[in-house]
Image: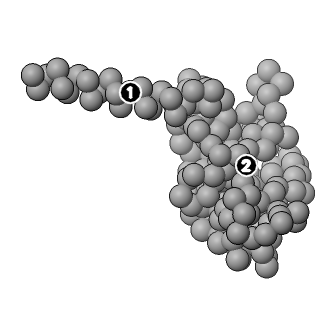
Amino acid sequence: MRAVLALLVTVALAGVAQAQFDDYGTVFPYCYCNESCGPIMTDYVTKEKTISFTIKSKPDCPTWGSDKCTMDIGKIEINTFIACRFSDVYAYTNGNRTRLDFDDSGFEGVQLIKLNQIGMSLSDLATQDLAITLEIPVDATTYGQRCLTSDALLNTTDGAPISIAIFSSNIKCCNNYEL
């Protein structure tokens, strides 16, 4: 009887997990994401060794209490290649160096660059934009370095767009940008 109950619970949980990822789990950001809320990304610039963009509060929000305007910024994810995992890349938020992690997306050949500790509240974002810069060191060499340029770092295979997702701290909301 316990084995049957355990099997039923496992099947039920698997069904819930699959339902969460239907239509969402196979494309960036590789998870369910309420894309109807959140800040906007502007000023995207890519140079040979840098990627930068700015995150601003949404200018056309009718009220700060609406669903579309209550998203803080908990983390940012950028689609990249698995081959870039051990590359030297520095991340800066508003000019201050911040932690950057490479993480497996669960799909073969795909890796994510994650800035997990943004922690910018809605009230902070209303008064100050968030400037993000990723930088590949100018002195990076091919020894141990697989992605030496911004173009090599960004996962744009087969004409895929550059993909960046901004998540709320509770991970309930995100905005996905394709550039």
Quarter holding the N terminus?
top left
Q: Which amino acid does label 2 sit on?
A: Ser
Left or right for 6, reference 157: left
Quarter holding the C terminus?
top right
Tell me which corner region of the image, top left, top right, bottom left or bottom right, holds residue 28: top right
Left or right for 125, reference 110: right
Tell me which corner region of the image, top left, top right, bottom left or bottom right, holds residue 8: top left
Residue that label 1 marks:
14
Residue that label 2 marks:
36
Q: Which amino acid does label 1 sit on?
A: Ala
Q: Residues within 10 Å of mark 2 (few under 14, many from 20)?
A: few
Closer-to-camera residue (106/82): 106
> Where is residue 93 drawn, in percent x and y?
71, 67
Left or right for 66, reference 52: left
- Name above or below for residue 178 compared with residue 118: above
Residue at 83 percent across and 66 percent down: it is: 62
Closer-to-camera residue (78/170): 170
Closer-to-camera residue (165/135): 165
Q: Using the image, tell me which numbered label, if any, was put on residue 110.
A: none
Q: Contact, CB < 8 Å: mark 2 with mark 1?
A: no
> Where is residue 120 drawn, in percent x and y?
65, 70
Kind of element beneath mark 1: helix
Q: How crowded is mark 1: few (under 14 residues within 10 Å), some or many (20 or more)?
A: few
Q: Can residue 112 be seen in this view?
A: yes
Q: Residue furthest left?
A: 1
Q: Can residue 95 be seen in this view?
A: no
> Where is residue 49 drawn, in percent x and y?
81, 49
Question: Whole-Å distance between the Cαs marked 2 and 1?
Answer: 27 Å
Residue at 57 percent across and 27 percent down: it is: 22
Residue at 44 percent across and 32 percent down: it is: 17
Residue at 75 percent across and 40 percent down: it is: 163
- Name above or below for residue 88 compared with residue 79: below
